[in-house]
Image (tube, grey):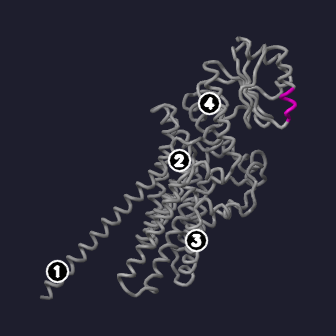
Amino acid sequence: MDEKATAEETDGETSTDSSRKWLVWAALAAIAALFLVLRLRYINQLLGWDEAQLALTIKSFSAGTRDVWSSLSHIHPPLYLWLMAFLTKAFGARVIAYKVFSILFSFGTLVVTYAIAKRLFSQGVALLAAFVLAVMPAAVVMDTWVKQDPMVGFLIVLTIYLFVRGSWKWAGVVFGLGMLTKETAIFALMAVFLFSLACWDREKLKQTAFIAGIGFVMSFWWYAWLATGVGHFWSFFWSGAGDGALFKQPVGYYFAGLTKDIGWLLLALLALGLVVCVYRRIRDGKKDYALPVVWFLGVYLFLSISVGKPYWMVPPALPAIAMLCGIGAAGVLGLVPRLVTNPWAERSTKSALVAALVVVTVFSAFSLGYLSYNRARYKTYWDYSAGVKKDALYLKARAGGNPVMVILDEKQINRDAILTYYLGNTKQISLFSNILAKPRELVDQYAITYNSDWIYIKTRPDVKQVDSFLAGLADWVPYKITRNSKWGTAVELTWSN
């Protein structure tokens, strides 16, 4: 009788475990589908300046063309550029392919975040963290960008995962690959170093030193002899020089931006997660709970002391934020048994809380507007991108196969990335602003020589300078202003009419 009862209990436990596994896999499949759906709907969205510039750099670099865009290939480390150049040679210069790979790298980040949370905390926290990362507004938008960030974000979280599981040699190799992708890979080393300090573990500190050594040996050649952007980044972050002046923000800018980057509900769970982690580390001695805290705060505090503060610098911290939100949500669910004694009522309450979290965050994610989010973070940047894209498409349709003469503003020394990208195959003749004092030279040396009937004059503070140019231009060729946007003026030379 006892053997029969024991067998029935074992069968029941096996059946329960099997059901739980299926539920976990079903939840993971739903999270993966949600992740992909939310991002793929943005795959054809407007490119920002940095994305357009990098897309043009990839195209020129892969074709072996020496121009203003290929000259930018040494600003950041080369690994991402090499990978995208390979894709370009295989599939052509297709921005959609670059975006797909960004999404795939970001999906890898989600998978590894889940693995870290499961290893350090619990299956429930891991599922919640993965879900949060899938629906987080900042991640939904930035995971699709044509930038090095999705790739280096994956390498950052993979470095931390390998460190956590004790594979410090492989962690060093992955960290080296990260440093050859983008400078922000240094946040991986920061996270494992601060975690080792928080654990006060000499062995972990020693492993961190080895990781740093391996990574720096792998990437030293680039930073020592080929990189051209190190001095620029130093001045950008620490003095706000150059284009860093465009990104000057208060010290608390990144923390204040959390309301837009993750939303109020997740911000509340983040705060609760921080409290739970500090409590578990100090009172219970659970060292693992220090990792998401030092990871998140380390990145955000470091970025906060920078003078230049682009809002897109936060992705290296998003996995830590997701884990903290997962811990916070698990903490809320853990309070239910203390408040509700009836088992059925307890299960129902937990289910209702999880359902509320899912409904609110998924609704917010689907109602998120790509441009509305980005404009809320940096309005001028995205208004400019959207406006110049319209100007470029207008000029492309009107000019046909003839080149467009583009008179740059005083801040630009080469070409406008947005204008160039959206002009596509329509060639442009880039002219410095001093040509505004020489309308006859423009006509004789450029309009006639290159059979160009269109001029695009970038908007500048000195309106009289443009008026004077147009008055002088009328002495040599008839024209008409066909488009006058906030960002530029389109002028058609009508001599052929």
Say few, some or many: other residues with alpha carbon within 10 Å of mark 2 (under 14 / 14 to 19 / 20 or more): many
- State how far apart marks 1 and 3 are (Cα): 46 Å
Can you see residue 483?
A: yes
Q: Which residue is drawn at 55% across and 79% down?
A: 281
Where does residue 363 sit, x and y in percent of width and height?
50, 59
Identify the disc placed on residue 393. 4
Q: Which residue is drawn at 56% across and 40% down?
A: 81
Task: Name the element at disc 3.
Answer: helix
Three-letter code, disc 4: Leu
- Residue named by callout 2: 144
- State how far apart marks 4 and 1 are (Cα): 73 Å
Three-letter code, disc 2: Thr
- State how far apart marks 2 and 3 are (Cα): 26 Å
Q: In which quarter of the image is residue 324?
A: bottom right
- Residue named by callout 3: 268
- Residue named by callout 1: 7
Three-letter code, disc 1: Ala
Where does residue 62 sit, x and y in percent of width and height?
54, 31
Q: Residue at x 69, y 47 (%)?
A: 230
Span colored in magenta: 462-467
Say few, some or many: other residues with alpha carbon within 10 Å of mark 1 (under 14 / 14 to 19 / 20 or more): few
Residue 197 horizontal side relative to residue 132, left or right: right
Say few, some or many: other residues with alpha carbon within 10 Å of mark 3 (under 14 / 14 to 19 / 20 or more): some
Where does residue 487 sit, x and y in percent of width and height?
73, 36
- Label 2 or label 1, whichever lies nearer to me, is 2
Identify whether 20 is placed above or below 103. Answer: below
